[in-house]
Image (cartoon, helix red, strand yellow):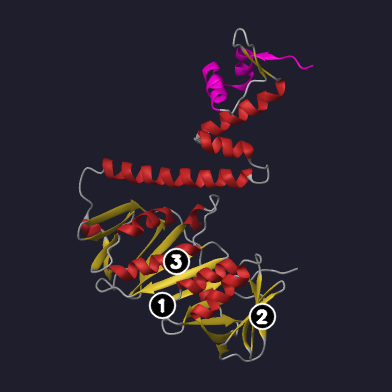
Amino acid sequence: MCERLSIGEYARRAGLSISAVRFYGDRGLLVPASVDPGTGYRSYDEAQVAAGRMIGDLRRLRLSLADVATFLAARSDDRPALLARHLGALEAHLHDARAVAHTLLTEHPRSETSMARVTLPAPTLGAALDQVLPAVSRDPEEPVLGCVLVEARGGSLRLVATDRYRLAVRDLVPETGGDQEFRGLVPAATLRRWRPDLPSEGSLTLAVSADDLAIRADCLDLACPLVPAEFPAYEAVLACDAGARAVVVGREALRAGLSRVADQGDVVLVRASRDGVTLVRGDEEVTVPARGVGAVVEVALDPAFAVDAVEAVSGPDVVVEIADALHPVVFRSADDGTFTTLLMPVHVA
């Protein structure tokens, strides 16, 4: 029979204070192996030391008690994802804290002369964010891909996001300031937080300096530091011409078909032929009418990503460009060339 540890010895070996051991025990996280009915003294088994150390580590990571309980109850295979999600939230909070500190420590107004400015219709910027934000990476180990590139050049304001599996690009035409040039990375978490505050009508001004980005309108003044990093070179992917065949498909019909097969698994085969676009997943097969199809061409895609790409397209019809099973598939509106999503094909063994 294993020797029981007193609460003091257990606390020392688990790296916890005695009060913490009692606290976690009262919350059901560290239940004593036994409690003396006469004295109320708690004792613990040697095997419980590792659990105590784990709880201490999780609390140092700022997990709430509820999240600690969830982590302890989770399977070992699920625990990395729980920690990754928590770390991503910590990084977002840290960025927000730095932004607030930056504002507090700036004792004079932002220099307007050092900022490039463009004016845009407020609804247009909001819609553009809705289109590109789904393509942002949520991997905490890829912080740069957790940002949106905001780039002004050639009379256009461009928003770009990628998670390496898909690329979303939206070009906007400024009302004023189209001759400005700048380039900066804005955390997607900040843009998601700002999105509900953007006006649904009128115009707004987007101002960028070497270190900051601001969005201003009537009764609105949002600002955050830019992320000092380089965004991946994406232009070569956009410029790639692999001899793709373009087909025009009804947006709602294609979205409904993809949603139907998306429930069946993580890969869908997209086959374009004279009969239309056929979506195949296991025993499920859906054919959507299409125009402009020549020879048969097919590619495997992540159906959830494909649904996002179709939903982000404006207008009643979607243009889908498929080259072969190896090159990216392009989704864009049939009547608006300002937004493009590229999806990387999925390898099927």
Q: What range of the chain is rendered magenta?
A: 1-27
Front position among marks 2 and 1: 2
For badge 2, the amino acid type reads: Glu
Q: How far apart in space, not on screen, are marks 3 and 1 (Cα)?
A: 12 Å
**303 left or right of 223 in image:** right
Name the image quarter holding the N terminus.
Answer: top right
The answer to whether marks 2 and 1 mark residues whose Cβ atoms lie closer than 8 Å is no
**Left or right: residue 21 compared with residue 203:** right
* Residue 15 among magenta residues: yes
Contact, mark 2 vs mark 3 (Cβ under 8 Å): no
In the rendered structure, find residue 338 and report the number of the disc placed on it: 1
Apparent side of residue 208 relative to residue 143 in the rendered image (left or right) = left
In the visual, does 8 lie left or right of 183? right
Q: Amino acid at mark 3?
A: Val
Mark number, residue 132: 3
N-terminal of the pair, mark 3 or mark 1, is 3
Circle 1 crowding by C-alpha within 10 Å: few under 14, some 14–19, many from 20:
some
**Secondary structure of the residue carrying numbered label 1:** loop
Of mark 2 and mark 1, the one earlier in the sequence is: 2
Q: Quadrant of residue 207?
A: bottom left
| Cα–Cα span, label 2 and label 3 | 26 Å
Query: Please, what secondary structure does the residue beneath circle 3 have?
Result: helix
Check the picture and name the quadrant holding the C terminus.
Answer: bottom right
Q: Which residue is the site of mark 2? A: 298
